[in-house]
Amino acid sequence: EAGTLRVAGDSMTCYVESGQLVIYDRRRWPRRGEGCVIETVDGEIYVKEYAKTDGSTLFVTQRFPESEIRFAMAEIKGVYAIRFRGD
């Protein structure tokens, strides 16, 4: 099942730019280093780069400013692999 999202913000500049479209696969978990869409249980949506999960914590990175971000898995509704990005 595919989902689409128009990106807002610059946190992933050089991977995907603000205003571009991403198509993601709700049935596929991302691989390390791959772009992903993160959906939280409270409805927030993020585009980041997947790093890993240890079962209780999701680790992702953003490119601008470059940093690691952690989410408690209890707050996550889904993590989906990005299949396409562009205009």
Image: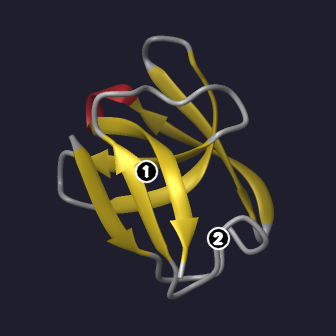
Q: How far from the left and from the top, in percent, is residue 68?
A: 72, 46
The residue labelled by disc 1 is: 37
* Residue in the image at 41% along x and 32% along y: 72
Image quadrant of residue 79? top left
Residue at x-position 52% and y-position 81%: 20
Amino acid on which the number 2 mark rests in the picture: Val
Q: Label 1 is placed on what type of residue?
A: Val
Q: Where is residue 23 in the image (x, y as percent from the top left)?
A: 40, 58
- The residue that disc 2 covers is 16
Q: Foreground: 45 or 20?
A: 20
Compared to residue 19, the image places residue 79 above or below, namely: above
> Vertical placement of 81 versus 64: above or below?
above
Q: How many labels does the image show?
A: 2
Closest to the observer: 60 or 4?
Answer: 4
The numbered mark, 1 or 2, whose residue comes first in the sequence reads 2
Within 10 Å of the Cα at label 1, are there few (<14), some (14-19), or many (20+) other Cα atoms? Answer: many
